[in-house]
Amino acid sequence: MKKFIAMLMAAAMMMAMVACGNTASNNGGNNGSNNSGSADEGGSTDGTVVIRIGGIGPLTGGNAVYGVATQLGAQVAVDEINALGGPIQFEYNFQDDTGVAETAVSAYNTLKDWEADIIYGCTTTAPCVTVAAETFADRYFQLTPSASSTDVTEGKDNVFQMCFTDPNQGVTAADYISANSLGTKIGVIYNNGDAYSTGIAEAFIAHAAEIGLEVVATETYPSDSNTDYNVQLNACKDAGADLVFLPIYYTPASLILAQASAMGYAPTFFGADGMDGILTMEGFDASLAEGLMLMTPFNADATDDATVNFVESYKKLSGDVIPNQFAADGYDCIYAIYAALQNIDGLADMDHEALCEALIAAFTAEDFSVDGLTGSGMSWSTNGEISKDPVVVVIQDGAYVTM
């Protein structure tokens, strides 16, 4: 089972010409519409089982870059799997939640009306926490590509994550900085109004103290449209921080890098996975990110066949946009679901509640592990948390280089 996805991906590559162009019109909902396609739900006369996957994420609003990435990354996988012509086929319907919890519930209800079998999403944490409570009550299996808070899965046996949890990222970042002697005095700047940012920062600070990293400045900012980070940067500079840890998304990070440059402050900056995508941010001077390190499970510049083929397919689907790790996580979500479905008998006769229980058992089986774009030997615990190796990249000459 460990090499299952790698073999599926290799087979899918042989069908690439078939898959190209087989997008929303054939697989449902690529633009957030309720387009279910023409296939029958469940079993069909030719023995094919059709599984309806309903996706949720922001296609509009400030977090749209993440939602679009998870939407299209999953679409690439759906197209590849359907092109194989196997006994399991997917219908795919992705709904816009605008990054807001209330809208996410409406998107979820739309997918229920569409008679989804599995929920893929949400993309961001707050909407995912809200929707997870709904899927738990309704007994839908849910796999999120990128919502990383432990609140997403806590107390919910039906919800699983493809990304690292926030505490896991914080601990891993502290260990990596310490093991590689990247800084002697550490500053931390984070958004204290955001669960993702706070969760990583608090775990990082606590673990830094345990392993002897000296955190000399801990600075926060609110969520409500903060654009001036000079106070936080000056505090880190005055404390002598030679590395600043930024467990934040790339939009505020881009401003921090610009303002640090303007004041002549040049520590090593180290980010988490929310930093991925900063090089493709419209209007951002990529030279400001030179030397930036970040944790990400995916490097689009990697030269292995699986990555090269995924990047090529994604660019065709997206209009030449380079995929980020959110896209790769989405791709891996669909293949992980597909791998788990291979281990379930009687799919054609299952409603979504029975399928939920079967997928929980499949994902938590001791011998279930998959290889994907974002990690090898990926496996899941009963609390929905994934186990895979982290990857750290540094930006050099405007490109990600794996460290």
Image (cartoon, rainbow, N blue to C red):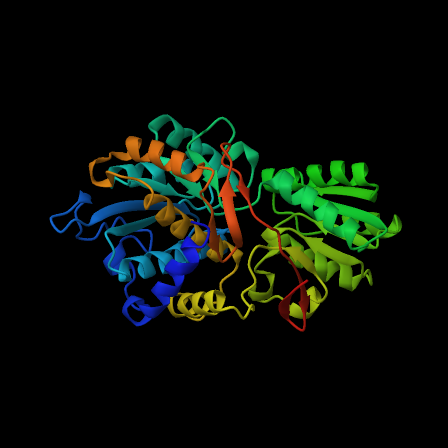
Report the front residue among 60 and 28.
28
Q: Which x, y percent locates residue 346? A: 23, 38
Q: Which x, y percent locates residue 187? A: 79, 47
Task: Tell me what residue is drawn at x 81 percent, y 48 percent.
Answer: 186
- Residue 402 lies left or right of residue 266; in this view the side is left
Report the front residue among 346 and 256.
346
- Residue extending farthest to the left is 45
From what the image shows, is residue 107 above or below residue 3?
A: above
From what the image shows, is residue 366 above or below residue 53?
A: above
- Image quarter where the C terminus lies is bottom right
- Residue 285 lies left or right of residue 16; in this view the side is right
Q: Which x, y percent locates residue 278? A: 60, 61
- In the rendered image, is residue 95 in sight? no
From what the image shows, is residue 311 above or below residue 141?
A: below
Task: Tell me what residue is drawn at x 30 percent, y 41 percent.
Answer: 111
- Residue 227 lies left or right of residue 1; in this view the side is right
Query: Which quarter of the figure has residue 20?
Result: bottom left
- In the rendered image, is residue 193 in sight? yes
The total of numbered circles placed on residues is: 0
Q: Which x, y percent locates residue 89? A: 26, 52
